[in-house]
Amino acid sequence: MADLIDGAATEEAAPQRRLSNAYQNWYRFSRNPTAVIGAAIVIVCVLLAIFAPFITPYPKDVGAMVNFRVRHMPPSAAHWFGTDDVGRDILTRVVFGYRVSLLLVLVVLGTAVPVGSILGMLAGYFGGWVEIVIMRVTDIALAIPPLVMALAVAAVLNPSLVNSMLAVAILWWTWHTRLVYSITRQLRTQEFIEAAETLGASKFHIIFREILPNCVSAIAVKTSLDAGFVILVGASLSFLGLGIQPPTPDLGTMVSSGASFLPDNWWESVLPGCAILFVALGFNLLGDGLRDLFDVQEVR
Amino acid sequence: MEFLLFLIRRVLWSILVLVGLSIVIFVIARVVPGDPARMALGPTATQEQVADLQHKLGLDRPLIEQYGLFVADLSHGDLGRSLLSERQVTADIRDSFAATFELVVSTILIAMVLGVPLGVIAARWKDKWPDNVVRLIAIFSAVTPTFFLALLLQILAGYVLHWLPTTGRLTHGLDFVPDITGLAVVDSLLRGRPDITLDALRHLLLPASALAAATMGQMARLTRASMLEVANQDYIEASRAFGIPDWLRTVKYMLRPSFVPPLTIMGLEFASMIGNAFVVELIFSWPGMAAYGIRTILQKDLNAVMGVVMVSGVFFVVVNLVIDVLVGFVDPRIRIRGAR
């Protein structure tokens, strides 16, 4: 953080120091078991999702395949996670399900994080009526449960992947606005902001070059923690039948359709459920680890 | 006096949020879908039928006027008629809300009764094994999907071990209607039927536990963090020097100020708890708002859906109001600051 303040004066020494900073960060990161385990899980899930068609044993089972000869098979060497009620390989569908979950995370956080952060900085820096309007709207949006909102959107539009993304994203920015707002308010009165103002820096410069870099670590921690929760909300939606529609593989849908065969055919819903837990755990541990690493207290 | 000022400010603010909420709901219900009448009647309805319903619902008037009517109705508790059941939405929701309320209150109780002591234990034995166990519990309870946990609990405690009933609110065939407050546990006590109370509690335990897990973990984490923050304060050091016993210091001087952040956060988290309550109610066939909400969503019954959203929002605002007042009681610093 400190190097942002005196950055101009020591421009020449900067690259070298930045390198050692990066090394230091990496060293501290690698000593933090929570962060490393979390990062490893996230990387595994992302790689699985990207290379799904090449590594899954039965890529054809993604669609509306039916193979009744092997329906309800318990986990075995041929089908590690067993098969479902129409004989599709569950492992294959779980791996493809990660694609949907991670796409949801990407779209929701890709819109919610920039929007929420910019609104938070504007409200925190300008104060006055800008602050009143933005923060009051945020409070109102917070009063609506995201899952209930998603249900309402699903009712007005039709249940589909795009609409559930829209429904989740439409409320998600609020948390980022609150977080960035509280940091910005603390920063506003600090000397380096005052100095930049005195030097005649534009408001744009102050917000994006002075304030934003100081929020980045908190935003990163929050985003990582959020990714897990976006996956959980998305899975809940499809569990209720209001998210992505079959036959596209989705982890929430798989848990719900497998539930009717519990407890005898436990693998049909328990293993997809564990898969959701696994990826959410990864993002959560990563966020926790990053929080220790950056030492940001603002993020819960 | 200053507490009264704080209260007034807080209530006015809540009203403002509710007005905003009504605008949001109005926009979703009346503006986004294009034509709610066409949606309700389906593609086979004739143009006259649609125009007729439009007129009946006031959809042929300007938007501002429609919003005025909407708010006027809302102010005396009229959310319009359900397009399908033809009943007042408020009546439909009133029937189911008590069950949801009972579930949510039990959930909060479980989350606090388990979460706070876990946090205290973790803080007291920081970085020792109890702390690590609590951390593990907190992380797993946060990342386990609520519907998955609900399913697992239902299967394990219900079908495999036969400990607890797995569906519904009361054992089927019991002749008892909670007609005083609508809460089965309270009403059965008021009517002097402790056997029913026990039955209701047994039905509550599984769904409420499934719903409580996430909040409980969050509570434990936050209580731990704020206990540790308080532990660094001078007055704790002073109390140690005075020889005040360990347990007394922990409970009286550390826990009370540490209680505020977890409580406020729980208020905000309450929104996601209502959302998850929908899933849990569905799994345990709990006759609450969720069953109603989901049925009406699938049938595109917009008035009913918006009623459910509105009631959820009001529930959230009221709970947060109560929490803020509670926090003001626990921590006088906040009500003084809040009143200014």
Image (cartoon, rainbow, N blue to C red):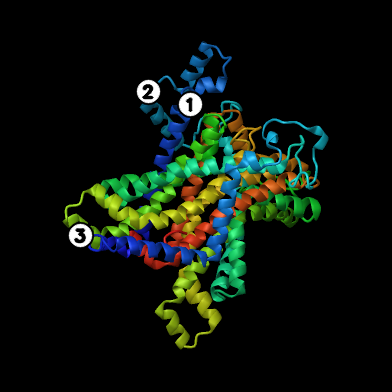
Q: CA distance from mark 2 to mark 3?
A: 52 Å
Q: What is the chain identity of the residue bearing mark 2?
A: B
Which residue was labeled with disc 1? B33
Q: Are marks 2 and 3 in contact (CB under 8 Å)?
A: no
Q: CA distance from mark 3 to mark 1?
A: 51 Å
Residue B58: image location, x then y, percent: 44, 22
To which quarter of the image does residue B93 belong? Answer: top right
To which quarter of the image does residue B44 belong? Answer: top right
Q: Residue at x 75, y 39 (%)?
A: A84
Q: Is residue B143 visible?
A: yes
B116 on left or right of A91: left
The amino acid on which the numbered mark 1 sits, given as a three-letter code, is: Pro
Q: CA distance from mark 2 to mark 1?
A: 16 Å
Q: On residue A218, which mark appears?
A: none
Which residue was labeled with disc 2? B62
Q: Are marks 3 and 1 on the same chain?
A: no
Q: Name the residue nearer the viewer: A195 or A6.
A: A6
The amino acid on which the numbered mark 3 sits, given as a three-letter code, is: Ala
**2 or 1: tag closer to the N-terminus:** 1
Give the secondary structure at mark 2: loop
Which residue was labeled with disc 3? A195
Residue ranking furthest to the right: A69
Residue neighbourhood size for the residue with mark 3, other residues' Cα within 10 Å, grouped as few (<14), some (14–19), many (≥20) = few
Does B188 sit above or below residue B249?
above
Q: Are marks 3 and 1 in contact (CB under 8 Å)?
A: no
Give the secondary structure at mark 1: loop
Pair 2/3: label in front: 3
Q: What is the chain identity of the residue bearing mark 3?
A: A
Q: Are marks 2 and 3 on the same chain?
A: no
Q: Residue at x 29, y 64 (%)?
A: A13
Residue neighbourhood size for the residue with mark 1, other residues' Cα within 10 Å, grouped as few (<14), some (14–19), many (≥20) = some
